[in-house]
Amino acid sequence: QVQLVESGGGLVQAGGSLRLSCAASGRTFRNYVMGWFRQAPGKEREFVAAISWSGTRTYYADSVKGRFTISRDNAKNTVYLQMNSVKPEDTAVYYCAADLRITAVTTQVYAYWGQGTQVTVSS
């Protein structure tokens, strides 16, 4: 069982930066693939980024590639999403997800999900 708690959301101006954190419980965090998803008002939840258990492989949605960076610190049981050059269309609730065996990391079949953190980008 893994519990995930996101933090770091808030209001930011377009062009600014924000760093989201996702703290995970459990001693086996280092074994989990971690992902970030987001859901904008009136839209489906969508994939943003994912990172392998070792941190050596990362995956990004085309819409955030080059602007967002996913990373993890297994010693702190935490995964991060650094958001740079944010745009109003990045406004959404951002969710952290975890799974031990997922291979299709851009899909939403992760076993564990956090409650989400709101990110609002003003123009």
Image (tube, helix red, strand yellow):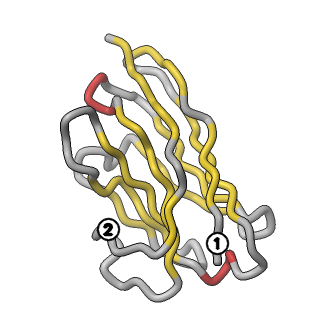
**Relative depth, front residue between 16 and 99:** 99
Indicate the quadrant where residue 18 lies: top right
Q: What kind of residue is marked 2?
A: Gln
The residue tagged 2 is 108
Where residue 1 sits: x, y (%)? 64, 78
Q: Earlier in the sequence, mark 2 or mark 1?
A: 1
Q: Secondary structure at mark 2?
A: loop
The residue tagged 1 is 2
10 Å neighbourhood of mark 1: few (<14), some, or many (≥20)?
A: some
Looking at the image, the residue that sits furthest to the bottom is 101
Q: Is residue 33 left or right of residue 108?
A: right
Task: Judge whether 58 appears above or below 65 on screen.
Answer: below
Q: Is residue 45 left or right of residue 67?
A: left
Q: Residue at x 59, y 51 (%)?
A: 80
**Relative depth, front residue between 84 and 2:** 2
Task: Judge whether 63 appears above or below 56 on screen.
Answer: above
